[in-house]
Each structure stands twice: as structure tokens, then as C-alpha cells.
Amino acid sequence: MKYAVVTGTSKGLGAAIARLFMQASIHVIGLARHENQDLANEDLPGQYHHVTVDLADLQQTEQKLQEVMDDLKTKPLQAVYLVQNAAVVTPIEQVGKQTSGELTRHVHVNLLSPMIITNLWLQGWRESDISCVIAHVTSGAANRSVYGWSAYGSSKAGLDRYTQTVALEQEQLGTGKKVLLFDPSIMDTDMQGEIRSSDESQFSDVQQFKDYKQHNQLRSTEKVARVLVDRLLKPEDLVNGQYLSVKELL
Ligand SMILES: NC(=O)c1ccc[n+]([C@@H]2O[C@H](COP(=O)([O-])OP(=O)(O)OC[C@H]3O[C@@H](n4cnc5c(N)ncnc54)[C@H](OP(=O)(O)O)[C@@H]3O)[C@@H](O)[C@H]2O)c1
């Protein structure tokens, strides 16, 4: 049996990744606050199981992930995948006008919960030699400063450094476990809708993002997810710390 734990499967890229895993006979455990009835109703070789969790709540995140790990350990597994895709872009606002609560939630969802989950994951599979691949979804915003995206750029930059450090450790330890980054570029999702709905005083590039939508420049999540899942299905070809960029691969 092969299993994938995917965060943020209620919609957007996470839902598309889950569906492709299921098509490839990989069972998916999806983590998000909202369920995804379409995935639950799919008749595919891999099944979908939903776990409701608010990744901004770190105690809840740890508890739910531990329950998932305990359940997985009862199964005859050949391979496990972890795809940490859930993220928020908000607050979209200049520094000096954000609230501490918004910032706390942002960093919990985008950076701390992925760190907690990856830590528990590697702890759980340390003594196991089944195939184990982790992918963290990042953004080009990690590598450039965007007016209004201080939180998003910082949390994604933190995720990049964290991921590459984990990859370096796993490589030096010779565990065979692979950890990589996936940059999906711009996609037609609710996150893009949130970006477009911001005011120019909060996000100075807002017109450019409205133009992306108007000129059909946003990729579909299905197309983007396929780039990632196709590669994850061949773990032997993956390199620890690899940065998979849709812009370069499509
Ligand atoms: N869209 C783009 O153009 C773009 C570009 C570059 C990078 N990315 C990255 O791609 C990934 C997917 O983005 P997307 O566009 O698909 O986003 P999206 O449509 O907004 O979906 C985000 C997903 O994350 C989950 N999520 C958010 N907050 C959560 C919380 N507190 N607890 C649990 N789950 C939570 C949501 O589930 P619930 O609301 O049900 O909890 C949802 O399933 C993100 O990492 C994003 O940064 C996106």
C-alpha cells in the first residue's frame, strides 16, 4: 500500500494533487479545515480520507498528525508521501498596518505547522526503510520582495531554508528519504482571488495580478499538480533538496 498525506486538500492545488495520487492508486489522507466531498465521492483506485484540522492551531496540528501516523503504522506500507501545500497569503498589507493576530496565524500555517509535521513525520519513519518523500510547496515570492507580501515572502523563504536544511541532514545521514521544494508559479485558485481583491494601497502590484486573470495567464491546478505528482511517482529520480519549478518544467 502507498499513502500520501497532503495538506490543504479542500480546494486549489492540494485537491488536484490528491486526485492525481488517487488515480495512481495512492491513498490520500487530506488535512484542511473544510472537507472535500468531491474527493470523498471519487471512484478511483486510491481512496480519500479527510482529517479536519486548523493548521494555525499548533497543538491540534501535532495531535492530528500523531493520530494519522499511528493509523498509518498499522498498515502494510511500501511508500509514504507527505505534501505540505496548505498556506495563506494574508495579511496582504504594508508593515505597520498588520495585526499581531494575523501575523501569528500566518506564520503558524505557512511555517511552524510544516516544521512540526515534518519533524513528527521523520521521527515516525526513522526506523523504517520504506520509500519516504516529502514535498513542500513554496512560491517565487520567497526570493523577491513584493510590496504588501512581507509575511508571505518571509514564511516561504523560511520554508525554503528549512526544507533544504532537512534535505541536507537526510542526505548526510544516508537515510534514503527525500525532501524537496515545489514552486507552482501562478494558478487559478481562490488564493489568486484574494490577491486580486486587495487594494492598491495594500498591494501595489494588484493590477498586474488582475491582468494575469483577464489574459488567462493563470495555469490550471490540474496541469500544475501533474508536474509534481509525475515526479513524485519516480522517487528514485528525485534529488534531495531539489527545487522543482513549474516555470522550468512546463
Ligand atoms: N495560487 C497561486 O498562484 C500560487 C502561487 C505560488 C504558490 N502558491 C502556493 O501553492 C499552495 C496552494 O495554494 P492555492 O492557490 O491552492 O491556495 P488556496 O486555493 O487558497 O487553498 C489553500 C488550501 O490551504 C488550506 N488551508 C489554509 N489555511 C489553513 C488552515 N489554517 N488549516 C488547514 N488548512 C488550511 C485550505 O483549506 P481550508 O480553508 O479548508 O482550511 C485550502 O485547502 C500554497 O502553498 C501557496 O502558497 C500558490
Image (cartoon, rainbow, N blue to C red):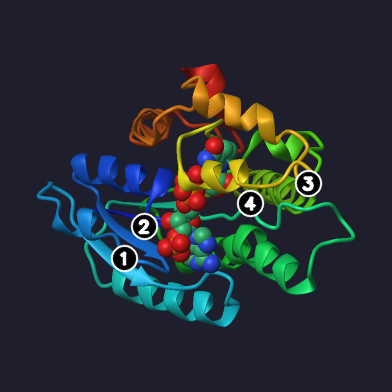
Q: CA distance from mark 3 to mark 4?
A: 10 Å
Q: Is mark 2 within 8 Å of ligand 1?
A: yes
Displayed quadrant of residue 107: bottom right
Kindly report which numbered mark, 1 or 3, lies closer to the viewer in this rendering: 3
> Callout 1 environment at 10 Å: few (<14), some (14 to 19), or many (20+)?
some
Lateral position of residue 104 relative to residue 243, left or right: right
Disc 1 target residue: 35
Disc 4 target residue: 89
Kindly report which numbered mark, 3 or 4, lies closer to the viewer in this rendering: 3
Q: Is mark 4 within 8 Å of ligand 1?
A: yes
Mark drawn on residue 230: none
The residue positioned 19% from the left and 59% from the top of the image is 40
Identity of the amino acid at label 3? Gly
Q: CA distance from mark 2 to mark 1?
A: 6 Å
Identity of the amino acid at label 1? Glu
Name the N-terminal-most of marks 1 and 4: 1
Q: Are marks 2 and 1 in contact (CB under 8 Å)?
A: yes
